[in-house]
Image: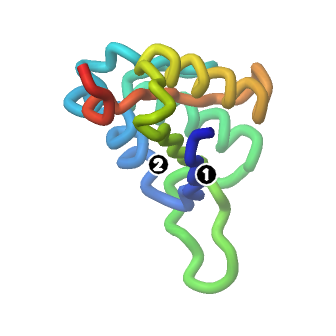
């Protein structure tokens, strides 16, 4: 059973996407995929921003509020597997894609990336 962690992103979506899709961590993005957006961080950001601003009717780049709750602009999920589970990078990627589709359906925008440094090659 994987360990799952959810991080709400209230600002810095561009930095979060750059971190998630970092070619150094993902072995040159070999196991990255996307749903309804591109796998390059700048393009994914532009596409996510356009959809957010169209439906939320507020700026994607607006700073978080100083008081009260700020809007969640993206959600970063981290899924980790124990060594004893013997999960390959390809299988972990497949699980990540299935998780996104099960939780959010086929209309959500998402990027899925496997951090290859976490796997024994």
Q: Are marks 1 and 2 in contact (CB under 8 Å)?
A: yes
Is residue 82 in view?
yes
Q: Residue extending furthest bottom?
A: 67
Q: Compare residues 23 and 99 and report the one nearer the observer.
A: 99
The C terminus lies in quadrant: top left
Q: Compare residues 2 and 50 and report the one nearer the observer.
A: 2
Q: Position of residue 15 (x, y in %)?
A: 36, 48
The colour scheme is: rainbow
Q: Position of residue 76 (x, y in %)?
A: 54, 47
Report crowding for label 2: few under 14, some 14 to 19, many 20 or more residues within 10 A (C-alpha): many
Q: Residue at x 31, y 35 (%)?
A: 118
Q: Is residue 82 left or right of residue 37?
A: left
Q: Compare residues 88 and 40 and report the one nearer the observer.
A: 88
The disc label shown at residue 73, or none: 1
Is residue 42 in view?
no
Say if 36 sits above or below 103 in the image.
above
- CA–CA distance between discs 1 and 2? 7 Å
Q: Which residue is mark 2?
A: 13
Q: Position of residue 64 (x, y in %)?
A: 54, 70
The N terminus lies in quadrant: top right
- Classify mark 1: helix, strand or loop: loop
The disc label shown at residue 32, or none: none
Q: Quadrant of residue 98?
A: top right
Say if 30 sits above or below 98 in the image.
above
Say if 108 sits above or below 54 in the image.
above
Report crowding for label 1: few under 14, some 14 to 19, many 20 or more residues within 10 A (C-alpha): some
Q: Residue at x 34, y 32 (%)?
A: 115
Of pointers 1 and 2, the one earlier in the residue sequence: 2
Q: Residue at x 58, y 27 (%)?
A: 96
Q: Residue at x 68, y 82 (%)?
A: 68
- Classify mark 2: helix, strand or loop: helix
Q: Position of residue 104 (x, y in %)?
A: 76, 33
């Amino acid at each position: 059973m994987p360990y799952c962690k959810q991080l709400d992103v209230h600002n810095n979506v561009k930095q979060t996407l750059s971190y998630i899709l970092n070619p150094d961590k993902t072995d040159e993005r070999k196991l990255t995929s996307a749903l309804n957006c591109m796998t390059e961080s700048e393009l994914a950001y532009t596409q996510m921003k356009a959809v957010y601003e169209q439906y939320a009717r507020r700026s994607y780049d607006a700073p978080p509020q100083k008081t009260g709750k700020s809007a969640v602009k993206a959600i970063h999920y981290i899924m980790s597997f124990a060594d004893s589970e013997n999960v390959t990078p390809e299988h972990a990627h497949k699980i990540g894609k299935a998780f996104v589709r099960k939780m959010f359906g086929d209309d959500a925008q998402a990027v899925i990336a496997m951090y290859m440094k976490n796997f024994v090659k």
